[in-house]
Image: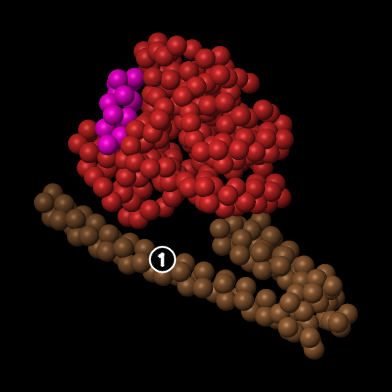
Amino acid sequence: MTETAVASRGAADLAGLAELRRVAIVPALNEEHAVPRVIDELRAFDPGLDIVVVDDGSVDRTAEVAAAKGARVLRLPFNLGIGGAVQTGFRFAFENGYDLVLRVDGDGQHDPTQLAAVLEPVLRGDADIAIGSRFAAEATGYRSSRTRRVGIRLLAWVVSRIVGQRVTDTTSGFQVLNRKGIALFARDYPHDYPEVEATVMVFRHRLRLCEVPVSMRERGGGRSSITTLRSIYYMIKVLLAIFIGLFRRNVVPHEEVR
Amino acid sequence: MTPIAVSIVGALASFSLVLVVLELIRSRRLRERYALLWLLTGLMLTALSAWREGLNTIAGWLGVRSYPPAVLFAAGILFLMAVLLHYATVISRLSDQNVLLAQRLALLEQQLEGDARDAG
């Protein structure tokens, strides 16, 4: 299921959002220049949104600038990698009883004004997890290395075949999750390059996932944590993980238990 | 030429290693990140044991004429050393992180006790 792209709107236009406890999870590694703007934009989009920055062992002032902007900061004592960092945020959201998680990267490549479109299917109850996809429609603005694009396409193809639903962007961290999604990821979330495995996991647990076309921006600062050689290593690792994941038994829908 | 028994036993043993590693990943006792080198080792040794002519050829390249399985042992030892070295780096990282965690915990405890005293 794919949503049609909509013009950017504020959170005020979304029915039912105001009653829900919602938190933005913003993983950040050395993003002192990009993070303040991300926080401002999230506030502008939805003043009632709690903002939690997960500082994944930054060596710059990421945690300080985020705290100065009034965000809550979860400061990891050392770098856990994106999977571990994001899961820290999911655990926070789960234990504090949030209804919705809006996951937005701290490097500024996700545009919070497009969150309305990603939120909609979850608010309507059509999906447990909605993912902003760069490739679901003629979304524009995203450029990255060729190896990486090929990798993203290949993984998308493999994942689509496995889950039996067209998935175009398995590496997007621009996501909205409801309580079911939060509960699943708080308990079990993959490491390193997590979104691909997580997508398969979502289907194995019978949660509903949908993609929403979005465009992404150039990174606001800092460096991507993924180089070409590592892309290839991750690709092999992720394919192995997906393959082996298929032989695991835990496919029962996960109930909300602590 | 390699004795046929060496080839058969070698291939079976190496392939069992691959299966054991896969099962360990499946049951979540081994993470993919630490399993890749083991899988590579297992597949490498399986290939070298089963592909007898290949082993002979490689032994020829290396000037090993009398006993080709020596190359098999050498490859096995090389891979095991790679795995061990990898583990040494992993242990080093873990012990650094462990120190950091203990320090953070001590600082947090001190902070909590301070807060409790202020409150009481």
Q: Tell me the quarter of the picture where residue B56 sits.
A: bottom right
What amino acid is labelled 1 in the image?
A: Arg
Q: Nearer the viewer, residue A221 or A106?
A: A221
Q: Is residue A6 visible?
A: yes
Residue situated furthest right in the rendering: B4
Residue B11 in percent (x, y) is at 80, 72
The chain that appears brown in the image is B
Q: Quick check: A200 above or below A79?
A: above
CA neighbours of label 1 inside 10 A, class few (<14), some (14 to 19), many (20+): few
* Residue shown at the point (28%, 51%) measured from the top left: A59
Mark 1 element type: helix
Residue A160 in percent (x, y) is at 68, 33
* Residue shown at the point (54%, 74%) measured from the top left: B84
* Residue shown at the point (56%, 19%) measured from the top left: A138
Q: Tell me the quarter of the picture where residue B60 sits.
A: bottom right
Type of colouring: by chain
Q: Is residue B48 left or right of residue A232?
A: right
A169 in magenta: no
Q: Quick check: A83 above or below B36?
A: above
The residue under label 1 is: B93
Q: Nearer the viewer, residue B57 or A185?
A: B57
Q: Nearer the viewer, residue A224 or B21?
A: A224
The chain that appears red in the image is A
Residue A137 in percent (x, y) is at 58, 19
- Highlighted magenta segment, given as a residue range: A33-53
Chain of the residue on which disc 1 is drawn = B
Q: Is residue B13 visible?
A: no
* Residue shown at the point (52%, 47%) measured from the top left: A228
Q: Quick check: A120 above or below A204?
A: above
Q: Tell me the quarter of the picture where residue A77 sits.
A: bottom left
Q: Quick check: A251 above or below B44?
A: above
